[in-house]
Amino acid sequence: MSAEATVEDLTPVLGAYLDNNRINQVRRAYYYAEQAHEGQMRKSGDRYITHPLAVAGILANLKLDHQSLMAAMLHDVIEDTGIPKDALSEQFGDDVAELVDGVSKLTQIEFRTRAEAQAENFQKMTLAMARDIRVILVKLADRLHNMRTLGPMPYEKRLRIATETLDIYAPIAHRLGMHSICTELEDLGFSSLYPMRSKYIAKALDKLRGSHREIIEDIRGKLEEKLKERGLPGKIMGREKHLNSIYNKMKFKHKSFHEIMDVYAFRIITETEDDCYRILGVVHSLYKPLPGRFKDYIAMPKANGYQSLHTTLFGMHVNIEIQIRTEEMEHIANNGIAAHWMYKNEESGVTTINQARVDKWVKGLMEIQERADDSMEFIEHVKVDLFPDEVYVFTPKGRIMELPGGATPVDFAYAIHTDIGNAAVACRINRNLASLSQPLQSGQTVEIITAPGARPNPAWLSFVVTGKARSSIRHALKTRERAESLELGRTLLKRSLKGFGAKLSDISEAQRQLVVNHNQVNSFDDLVSDIGLGNRMAYLVARQLVSGGEAMEEGPANLENTGDGKAGPVTIRGTEGLLVKFASCCKPIPGDPVVGVMDSGNGMVIHSDTCSKLPEDDEGRARLTHLKWAKDITDEFSVELRVELERQRGVIAEVANAVAMADGNIERIGVEEQNAKFGVVSLVVHVNGRRHLARVMRRVRNIRAVTQINRVRH
Ligand code: MN
């Protein structure tokens, strides 16, 4: 390779707007990248470093700040050389490292699905991922240079990159008002995708240019003369149509090449806004304007900030399109947001990046938006970038889901399908297992793991952010609560009936209806469900059912005869669900004598029968449900232990080890109180019953330093 470009070739461009210190920082980034990419080659045979250098060159022509240029130099370092982000932070500061990281993340996204509907979401995702708009600018310059040097790539890859450019990057450049980059990306993309068509149009354009030259010069001469006559400043330029836009007009507006090219287009660049309107008057006096074709984008700028006057005239037997704008409007029309990036600090003479100015520009756009009532398109996209409030994530099949900021895998699961949400048990984010409550970030691939028979967890309500997830979880919980309250209610009712020597299956339909009417509920199921929820007492309903109406008129319940003794206890397994809970005060475990307390609306709470929270009076005792444990319980229950011990090195570890040796799981361990010699340790341990607990306690008691161990009940 001869006379390869180096960073020194950039110096004159940089010198025009950056001070020496900043130029040196850009240089340093260049040399760092050069070393990192040492030995890597582009497909063209050039050294790899020529690519980042060219990307920085594109941005330097837009007069972007030194950090963007440094990021451009380093933009492939993380991705291609494995140098970590931290190393860049250390060398070049956090801002530059963040920019490089942001560009790398965009590079890593695979734009997998080509579906039309996806393109828009991909654009939004790209913007949402780049917290800093400069990430997008570096990425656009990267893409532009890759498109310019697409030639040596294999056909398949060329096709993919060109399609992606037309679907994602050109529209983003358009949204950011960067007309020059946008049209170049479009033309390059078009000629890569359709080389034959593009050659044909280019050839026809060439031919036309020759035959049109005369008339163009003629019109230009007349316009110039007229401006001079009125003493108005103005540069008159002929405008070329772009290949891609000609092709699109032919394809989508069904116009012939000659129809499109029969229009002669000029642009007049002048000094002030006033000049624009004066020049408009002049051209209208020269040729007749076509009605309905005049547009005042100076008073009413376009959504992306574009300003200009447009008019079409009829003269010399052809249509003449004219755009009139100031130098500054021209600059903004070409470079969009990048044009707002830099400004000259009058006092120091130094050009600096000014976020406030960019923000002001965006704010200005929003005001334009309100006035113009135009499409919300642009604002929405700038908004997701500057104030990101949405996340865009992939399904495993590559579909993009849009979710509000803070959304979790559970929200994602319900967004896909209610059944997926209801059966979710875990998830993978970018192929790694992750918690269902972890907030998602744009660009992640999320996979929900479901299990048959799984049910939504009430705790999910504390972190989901979408209405769909919230209402689906509530609905599922309600359905589940209903099923469980019916089951528990039926168990309790059957048992009470047994106390009266009756069976539920023996109670007639008429008798049931009588009791339903008396209690003013809608159905017998509602009555049973009420029992399960703890809103009604099983034995009262049972007595009404067996007495066939007589007992209904009786006032307060006759508590001496609840039938409880004859009925026998209800069997408890510990896996009954939402409506059977274990009291946190006495923490009963299998083997402990237990009783149930109906808690109105919430089902049953199981206490140890010696618990101090239980009612002591006869009436209260009579309302308790007698329970017994099922025989084959394998579930674990938590129990609290208090251990007194002599303080010595490693004694806590010894206690923990003893619990583990007895197959107990420690949920919590903490030192309650201690002095120089003694300490009290509180342990919460999972065991499957009293025998298991005894084993755990024996192990701990055997530790020499342990002086006492007790089970704690509050
Ligand atoms: Mn690159």
Image (cartoon, rainbow, N blue to C red):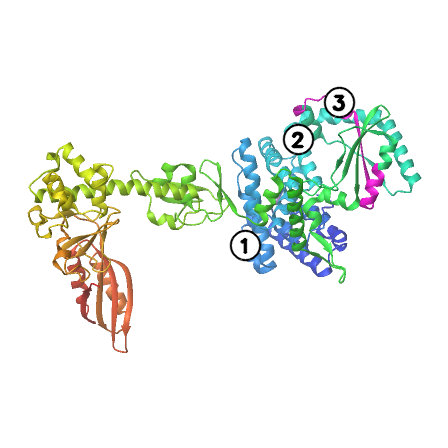
Q: Which residue is mark 3?
A: 259
Q: Is residue 258 magenta?
A: yes
- The kind of residue tagged 3 is Glu
Residue identified by numbered label 1 = 85
Q: Quadrant of the C terminus?
A: bottom left
Q: Quadrant of ligand 1?
A: top right
| SS at badge 1 | helix
Residue 507 position by quadrant: top left
Name the kind of residue labelled 1 in the image. Answer: Lys
Tell me which label, 1 or 3, sits earlier in the chain.
1
Q: Earlier in the sequence, mark 3 or mark 2?
A: 2
The magenta stretch spans residue 369: no
- Are there few (<14), some (14-19), or many (20+) residues within 10 Å of tag 3? few
* Residue ID at (84%, 24%): 211
Q: CA distance from mark 3 to mark 2?
A: 21 Å
Q: CA distance from mark 2 to mark 1?
A: 36 Å
Quick one: label 1, few (<14), some, or many (20+) residues within 10 Å?
A: some
The secondary element bearing badge 3 is classed as helix
Q: Are marks 2 and 1 in contact (CB under 8 Å)?
A: no
Q: Amino acid at mark 2?
A: Phe
Which type of secondary structure does the marked residue at label 2 adopt?
helix
Near mark 2 (Cα within 10 A), the count class, few <14, some 14-19 or many ≥20, is many
Q: Which of the two discs, 2 and 1, labels the residue nearer the N terminus?
A: 1
Quadrant of the rendered image containing residue 489: top left
- Which of the two discs, 1 and 3, sits closer to the camera? 3
Q: Which region shows up in magenta? A: 251-280
Rendered location of residue 380, percent (x, y)? 59, 43
**Up-down relation of residue 75 to residue 402 (above or below):** below
Residue 43 visible, this orientation: no
Q: Check residue 190 in the rendering and tell me which mark sits there, or answer none.
A: 2
In the rendered structure, are the residues bearing label 1 and label 3 in contact, judged by CB atoms less than 8 Å apart?
no
Instruction: Please state which of the two labelled residues, at mark 3 or mark 2, is closer to the viewer.
Output: 3
